[in-house]
Image (tube, coloured by chain):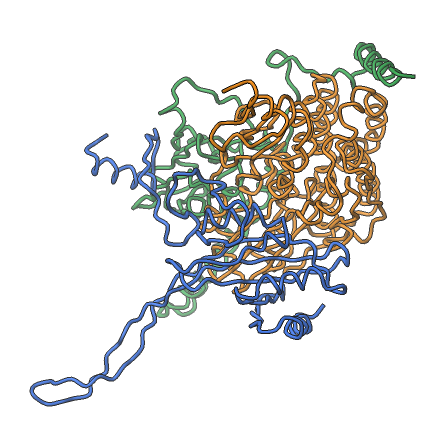
Chain colours: A blue, B orange, C green
């Protein structure tokens, strides 16, 4: 089934939705559909319930971290140099916020087709990290969304039981984020080398040999 | 607490978390419980012997496999996939290889496809035998069925060792083919094992399938409805035990599965007994596939000549590849940014998703049935926790 | 009849029990360590370094290219490359590892080092009885402990070793023919045009 037709059908049936096809240049050709978080539940319900689509099986749910990039731009600024106003070109660096992404792979057990890939993006990676949970539509997302919450820190609104799943309750960071820094949990190893040795040396110098 | 509150609490069970007023008994089953097949814990609330609440607790075996894979090369992740579902390393390799092949558009030579089907179906045989053995062990049939199952499994593992060098951590497949060709005499030996396998299945059925105790413990226990199974994304023998005809070998026709004729066994009631029977029947179908594949296996190369394993850099993009592993849909989702390491590497573990309905199946059952239901799910903690 | 299934099952166990006295197929237990199963040829356990000839230091095939160190998934190999070159078994000057350590407590026997080695210098051993009382020093194997002769390799993996030997012999023959050709060309060049050494240099390449 063509993603373009699915997109236009959703647009016809879900008023006010903003959809965008995210192209995929690899030979797999699995393009995906970026949906907005306001109408996500309605779009998902339509995909599940429409008689000829019937994407009743949500197979894979996962998160991706896209950290912000440094964007350098050349900007012309007027400056007073040696008492004369001059136009000087300067490189201005701005930091883009980046975002977290949740990806849903949908198949149909009834019609035996698929996959349709849905994506949702958070606004940034710091505090606007809420996305609607699709667990009310597909129960199979329950543990997988919990896993994303645990490892990436996306908060799924409407999830019935949003707790950490793989890390323990008191854990604070989100280990799958690209900028995650491992805590200094040095353990004595009899035969360290390379990176482990570096870590051991650093730990021992910081703690005074303990 | 007065006697009256105790009595009312008994008749109207409340979750014991609300202030400790209820008369429910909270039991922590696991993480070192023999029935949990690893380190897995369930917080169970019991009303007498009946289960009123069950929350699974994961993570004891978590090692962040996905993060490790992001720092490894594409080739370097292959041996790590062996350790996901450590009973079926070959199907794990296959799923990963399939995802990378989709990502980079690699064609696999004919002979390698046959080798994949042969080793993959042998994996299914040895997984299902050990799962059924463990299920019986969980039910209290200590030893005998498990030992008979392991005796047969051993023959398959011997085949794996002489082909791949290792019994369990096979590390056999590569993107673009397989690592090692069959040594001399291997095919004949494998044919012998496969020919003898139905005899073992007959024996096993005579030993167990009509057994009254087994039926009493499994029929009507842990019922999973069709609708819930689909909604919760259950896959594999568990889904088919509930009567949903969905087998990725038939749906996706990955590899060369469309060339073989085999049936997809389905259950009717969705209880533990149906899951047990579906696995037994699936093994008979696997034997059929194996016989056809071993008859037709062509000569030729086993690796795609154009694929280089070292310094492998697929173009930027993403791919999701999935196969029907013995436990259900095993998928790998890869994102490449053109560097030698994957940008994102995700395992879609069948075991974790199949555990979603554990509570639904256990509610209202006796505490001893949890063990049986858990055994019938067939999960491996190496894959659940990753 | 209730209990029929159980009786049938018990008959099956009885058949297995009695059968274990007559059929090898039903009694599969091997009394390790007194009895052993025959060694399977393709088996792999931990890597070892192959050397040619008698002297392990001189015959070591490893030229310290560091590929296995880089490709090893759990990063259990650590190599230090030599500063000087030493003559190898075929008389060619080569780099050699001054330190070659494998941490066997980290190694996961995946065989990727063997696959990526372009010099057939590292291979998989079949010895699995490696338990030791010293969990610190004894689990880090140095290059002396890792070195095993090509004869040993032929013994444990005869088919694979034969193929490797044939390939190496072929490469060596090619190399010899090439150097012979180069020497002849050099001699010929020296005989005809003694004032042009550059021709000899290009022929050598």
User: Residue C199 location, x and y as percent?
Assistant: 41, 68
Relative to A190, residue B343 above or below: below
Image quarter of residue B286: top right
- Residue name at image x 77 percent, y 39 percent: B241
Image quarter of residue B25: top right
- Of residue B274 and residue B132, the one placed in the foreground of this image is B274
Residue B47 relative to residue A96: left or right = right
Which residue reaches farthest right? C1
- Of residue B43 and residue A61, the one placed in the foreground of this image is B43
Residue B280 relative to residue C204: left or right = right
- Residue name at image x 58 percent, y 66 percent: A26
User: Residue B212 location, x and y as percent?
Assistant: 83, 20
Residue A43 relative to residue C197: left or right = right
Which residue reaches farthest left? A83
Relative to C28, residue A135 above or below: below
Image quarter of residue B81: top right
Residue C9 relative to residue B186: left or right = right
Q: Is residue C190 visible?
A: no
User: Residue A155 location, x and y as percent?
Assistant: 46, 53
Relative to A159, residue C197 above or below: below
User: Residue A66 location, x and y as percent?
Assistant: 43, 61
In the rendered picture of this protein, how many numbered marks are placed on residues? 0
- Of residue C81 and residue B352, the one placed in the foreground of this image is B352
Q: Is residue B264 visible?
A: yes
- Residue name at image x 57 percent, y 41 percent: C165
């Amino acid at each position: 089934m063509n993603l373009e037709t699915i997109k236009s059908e959703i647009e016809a049936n879900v008023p006010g939705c903003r959809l965008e096809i995210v192209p995929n240049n690899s030979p797999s050709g699995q393009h995906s559909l970026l949906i907005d978080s306001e109408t996500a539940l309605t779009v998902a319900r339509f995909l599940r319930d429409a008689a000829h689509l019937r994407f009743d099986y949500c197979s894979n749910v996962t998160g991706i971290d896209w950290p912000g990039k440094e964007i350098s731009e050349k900007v012309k600024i007027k400056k007073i140099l040696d008492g004369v106003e001059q136009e000087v070109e300067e490189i201005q660096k701005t930091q883009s916020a980046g975002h977290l992404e949740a990806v849903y792979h949908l198949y149909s057990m009834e019609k035996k087709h698929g996959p349709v890939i849905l994506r949702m993006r958070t606004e940034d990676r710091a505090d606007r990290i809420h996305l609607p949970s699709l667990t009310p539509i597909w129960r199979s997302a329950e543990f997988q969304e919990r896993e994303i919450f645990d490892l990436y820190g996306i908060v799924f609104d409407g999830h019935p039981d949003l707790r950490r799943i793989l890390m323990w309750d008191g854990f604070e960071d989100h280990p799958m984020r690209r900028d995650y820094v491992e805590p200094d949990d040095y353990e004595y190893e009899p035969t360290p080398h390379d990176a482990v040795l570096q870590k051991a040396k650093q730990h021992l110098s910081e703690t005074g040999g303990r | 607490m007065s006697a009256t509150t105790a009595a009312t609490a008994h008749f109207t069970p409340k979750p014991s978390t609300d202030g400790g007023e209820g008369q429910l008994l909270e039991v922590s089953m696991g993480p070192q419980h023999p029935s949990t097949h690893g380190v897995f814990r369930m917080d169970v609330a019991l009303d007498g012997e009946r289960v009123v609440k069950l929350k699974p607790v994961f993570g004891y075996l978590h090692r962040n496999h996905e993060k490790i894979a992001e720092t490894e090369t594409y080739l370097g992740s292959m041996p790590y996939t062996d350790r996901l579902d450590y009973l079926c390393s070959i199907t794990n390799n296959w799923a990963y290889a399939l995802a990378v092949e989709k990502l980079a558009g690699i064609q696999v030579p004919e002979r390698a496809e046959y080798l994949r089907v042969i080793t993959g179906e042998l994996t299914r045989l040895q997984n299902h035998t050990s799962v059924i053995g463990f299920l019986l062990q969980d039910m209290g049939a200590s030893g005998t069925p498990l030992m008979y199952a392991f005796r047969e499994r051993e023959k398959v593992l011997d085949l794996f060792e002489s082909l791949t060098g290792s019994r369990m951590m096979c590390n056999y497949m590569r993107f673009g083919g397989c690592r090692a060709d069959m040594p001399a005499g291997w095919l004949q030996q494998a044919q012998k094992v496969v020919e003898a396998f139905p005899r073992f299945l007959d024996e096993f059925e005579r030993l167990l399938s009509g057994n009254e105790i087994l039926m009493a413990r499994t029929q009507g226990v842990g019922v999973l409805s069709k609708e819930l199974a689909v909604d919760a994304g259950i896959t594999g023998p568990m889904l088919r035990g509930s009567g949903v005809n969905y087998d990725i070998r038939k749906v996706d026709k990955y590899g060369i599965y469309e060339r073989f004729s085999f049936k997809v066994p389905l259950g009717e009631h969705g209880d533990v007994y149906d899951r047990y029977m579906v696995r037994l029947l699936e093994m008979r179908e696997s034997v059929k596939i194996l016989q056809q594949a071993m008859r037709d296996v062509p000569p030729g190369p086993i690796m795609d000549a154009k694929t280089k394993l070292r310094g492998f850099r697929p173009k930027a993009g993403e791919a999701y590849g999935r196969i029907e592993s013995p436990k259900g849909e095993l998928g790998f989702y890869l994102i490449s940014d053109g560097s030698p390491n994957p940008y994102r590497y995700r395992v879609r573990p069948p075991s974790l998703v199949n555990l979603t309905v554990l509570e639904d199946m256990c509610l209202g059952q006796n505490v001893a049935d949890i063990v049986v239901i858990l055994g019938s799910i067939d999960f491996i903690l190496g894959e659940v926790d990753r | 009849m209730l209990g029929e299934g159980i009786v049938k099952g018990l008959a099956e166990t009885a058949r297995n029990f009695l059968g274990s006295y007559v059929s090898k197929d039903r009694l599969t237990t091997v009394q390790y360590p007194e009895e052993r199963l025959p060694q399977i040829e393709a088996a792999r356990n931990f890597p070892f370094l192959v050397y040619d000839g008698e002297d392990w230091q001189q015959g070591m095939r490893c030229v310290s290219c560091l590929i296995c160190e880089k490709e090893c998934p759990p990063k259990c190999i650590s190599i230090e490359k030599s500063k000087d070159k030493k003559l190898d078994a075929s008389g060619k000057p080569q780099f050699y590892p001054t330190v070659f350590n494998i941490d066997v407590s980290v190694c996961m026997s995946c065989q990727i080092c063997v696959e990526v080695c372009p010099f057939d210098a590292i291979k998989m051993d079949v010895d699995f009885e490696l338990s030791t009382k010293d969990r610190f020093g004894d689990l880090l194997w140095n290059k002396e402990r890792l070195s095993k002769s090509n004869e040993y390799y032929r013994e444990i993996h005869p088919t694979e070793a034969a193929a490797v030997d044939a390939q190496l012999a072929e490469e060596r023959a090619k190399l010899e023919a090439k150097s012979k050709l180069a020497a002849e060309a050099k001699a010929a060049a020296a005989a005809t045009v003694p004032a042009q050494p550059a021709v000899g240099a290009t022929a050598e390449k």
